[in-house]
């Protein structure tokens, strides 16, 4: 896989990174249903074996469980991938999650993540959400402190808009932005991606398959019967009328994918990677088989006619 420099950092990353949101399990409010830890470990090991050189996680995923699994999977690995994680979402003894950008809170989060990940330094530490917004400057100054102390190598943001990035850049450079981006979630194309491209801010997008909707594995029956502990159950993209339209789009992606021996999900990921501002895409994997089913996107180039066909279909979709 060819690698690309991530923003103003010295990191050369593969087009796809392993996303570990789903493997956090179902013991928190935004879980993806039950998860077999052994399958999660196999997924991470497979991703590294295939050459993926960065893993994105967060303290809040499974309330620390995802980070622990990442550390366990990487035990004994000589050429370890870059470790990216996030802060600002904290939880109490009742598992209630809240936002905090206070200095002491971020320091505690960083130290706890270092312990769970069993590492001395985090390669990229990101503010998960810009909330509470009035504490944004406090939070970013703290991130800069962590970098100066050597606890983290690079600092980035997630789910920030242009104005919020400008506020942080006035304090310390922003290495990267992590926003949602897929062919059905394109808001960042208007201002955010051009701004990042102009200011040399790396972009690692999440949910390029719209949380599995565009993977090719989602069916109407499965979407309408997701377990209660799967957060997608209440997502409008998995409910009618959007569900039907989305599944029709998947069939177009399936048709395009057949020409490349690729899955609909690989087409969806490749579509997101086509944008010149995008440095890489975070792709989740709950098993080694899922990793095998998406790795092809890293080397898939869509033809102009195929991109146009997708654009025309999306434009004609109602209620999007």
Image (tube, rainbow, N blue to C red):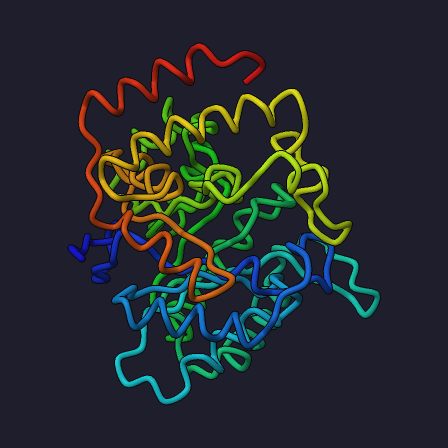
Camera-side residue of 97 and 170: 97
Camera-side residue of 79 and 117: 79
Vertical placement of residue 95 versus 234, above or below = below
The residue sitting at 47% across, 34% down in the picture is 161
The residue sitting at 65% across, 39% down in the picture is 223
- Say which quadrant the N terminus sits in: bottom left
- Say which quadrant the C terminus sits in: top right
In this picture, residue 217 sits left or right of residue 255: right
- Asked whether residue 301 is in view, the answer is yes
The residue sitting at 31% across, 49% down in the picture is 280
- Picture coordinates of residue 282 (x, y %)? 40, 52
Direction left: furthest residue: 2
In this picture, residue 57 sits left or right of residue 260: right
Direction bottom: furthest residue: 76
In this picture, residue 296 sits left or right of residue 42: left
Camera-side residue of 25 and 34: 34
Vertical placement of residue 34 versus 236, above or below = below
- Picture coordinates of residue 70 (x, y %)? 48, 74
Vertical placement of residue 98 versus 72, above or below = above
């Amino acid at each position: 896989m060819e690698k690309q420099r991530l923003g103003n950092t010295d990191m050369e990353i593969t087009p796809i990174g392993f996303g570990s949101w789903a493997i956090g399990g179902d013991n928190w409010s935004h879980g993806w249903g039950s998860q077999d830890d052994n399958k999660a470990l196999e997924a991470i090991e497979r991703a590294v074996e295939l050459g993926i050189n960065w893993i994105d996680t967060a303290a809040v995923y499974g309330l620390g469980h995802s980070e622990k699994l990442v550390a366990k999977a990487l035990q004994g690995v000589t050429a370890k991938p870059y470790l990216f994680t996030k802060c600002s979402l904290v939880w109490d003894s009742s598992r209630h999650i809240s936002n905090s950008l206070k200095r002491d809170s971020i320091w505690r989060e960083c130290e706890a993540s270092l312990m769970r990940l069993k590492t001395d330094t985090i390669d990229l530490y990101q503010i998960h959400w810009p909330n509470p917004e009035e504490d944004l400057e406090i939070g970013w100054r703290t991130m800069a402190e962590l970098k100066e102390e050597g606890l983290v190598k690079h600092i980035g943001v997630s789910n920030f808009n242009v104005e919020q990035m400008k506020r942080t850049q006035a304090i310390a450079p922003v290495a990267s932005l992590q926003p949602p981006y897929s062919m059905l979630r394109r808001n960042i194309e208007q201002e955010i991606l051009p701004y990042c491209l102009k200011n040399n801010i790396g972009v690692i997008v999440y949910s390029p398959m719209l949380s599995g909707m565009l993977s090719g594995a989602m069916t109407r029956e499965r979407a309408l019967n997701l377990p209660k502990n799967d957060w997608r159950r209440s997502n409008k993209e998995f409910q009618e009328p959007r569900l039907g339209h989305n599944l029709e789009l998947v069939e177009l992606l399936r048709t395009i994918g057949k020409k490349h021996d690729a899955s609909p999900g690989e087409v969806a990921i490749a579509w997101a990677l086509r944008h010149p501002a995008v440095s890489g895409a975070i792709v989740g994997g709950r098993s080694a088989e899922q990793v095998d089913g998406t790795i092809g996107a890293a080397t898939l180039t869509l033809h102009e006619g195929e991109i146009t066909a997708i654009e025309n279909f999306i434009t004609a979709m109602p209620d999007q």
